[in-house]
Image (spheres, rainbow, N blue to C red):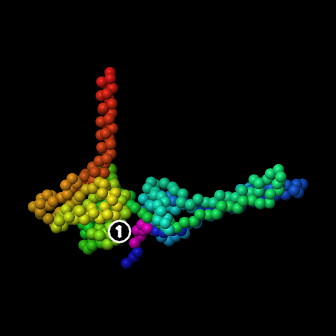
Amino acid sequence: MSESNFVDYVKIYCRSGSGGAGSTHFRREKYIPKGGPDGGDGGRGGHVYLRANRNLWTLLHLKYERHVFATSGESGSAKRSTGKDGEDRYIEVPCGTVVHDAETGEYICDVTDDGQTVMLLRGGKGGRGNTHFKTATNQAPRYAQPGEPCEERAVILQLKLLADVGLVGFPNAGKSTLLSVVSAAKPKIADYPFTTLEPNLGMVQYRDNRSFVMADIPGIIEGASEGKGLGLRFLRHIERNSLLLFMIPSTAKHIDKEYKILDRELVRYNPELAGKNRVIAITKTDLSDAKELSALKKTLPKGIPSVMISAVTNSGITELKDLLWTELNRETFHDADEIIRRDMDLSNGEDEDV
């Protein structure tokens, strides 16, 4: 079995550059045998940066580059010449990458926007040359500052996928099939549990050339928040989704019970997921008749938007897209309504004053 190209966790060792030493040079020319000090400053060491790149979607390229070293600054020289600065190093990562200290687990930074740059390690400052230490009583200082030492640190990079809609469900709920129908993504599809072993992203085309990103997460089982199955490894990818689409097949014995299990595992992993917007999709409706589907509707959780679909027959797919788009933009629409309402109130107040 070939190794997966999707890597969402990697540990690397980083080191900035040391500062160059200052020079203790003295001016020496043909007719100036005892010139004063003219040693230049050392160059600064190179910094180590983390930079988000929207063209990357995995940390695979860092799997084979576990050491990132910036170069040191060069020493100062004669005629007050400053040494060359060390070369900076940029670690390119996908948007949505979180960085923690490998030893302490301390949170360091998080990059989510394309081009966002964060300094991980600062290069050492260059030492000052002897020209800085000349005084009236010490006109020939024979010492200069050494450069500052480098910084070094082992860090853990974790990728949390950035998607608008995250698919949540038990294995074989039809998540990969749905993604293959509504987008150009080609996830592996088969009739056995844990067919999906890595997250898949797909761009879903909507009306008027609009679109949103959907993420297929490997199936969750009861106890995933405690490390069972594959859920624990991939649950973090759900944290960044704007909307969660719970997928439960129509053949399930207890729709409400399955939803509660999925919801419980998410909340146990991260309590903040309890307030995440969500939609329920009853899948594989082509396997049930109209009477069974009518009975299923009465068992759905109250207060949560729902839709019945079949990715095989394309039944309900258009309604699902409409519902997802409405829920994704609900906060935007609500804010716009508030602005309009506030403007109307202000206008009415001005009219009354007149």
| Image location (x, y in percent) of residue 312 | 21, 64
- Characterize the magenta stretch by its predominant secondary structure: loop
Quarter of the picture holding the N terminus: bottom left
Q: Residue furthest bottom?
A: 1
Q: Quadrant of residue 278?
A: bottom left
Question: What residue is at 72 percent from the left and 59 percent from the top?
Answer: 145
Outermost residue toward the left in this view: 291
Magenta span of residues: 4-9
Residue drawn at the location 25% of the way across and 52% of the way down: 323
214 left or right of 66 in image: left
Classed neighbour count for the residue bearing mark 1: other residues with Cα under 10 Å, few (<14), some (14–19), many (≥20): some
On the question of residue 42 being in view, the answer is no
Quadrant in the picture for residue 259: bottom left
**Percent position of residue 321, x then y:** 26, 54
Of residues 314 and 166, the one nearer the viewer is: 166
Direction from residue 25 to residue 99 in the image, left or right = left
The spot of residue 316 in percent (x, y) is 20, 57
Q: Tell me the residue at 42%/66% (across/down).
A: 8
Q: Which residue is mark 1?
A: 232
Q: How many marks?
A: 1
Q: Secondary structure at mark 1?
A: helix
Q: Name the kind of residue labelled 1 in the image.
A: Leu
The residue at 67%/58% (across/down) is 126
304 on left or right of 138: left
306 or 98, nearer to the observer: 98
Is-magenta flag for residue 178?
A: no
User: 113 or 14, which is in the foreground?
Assistant: 14
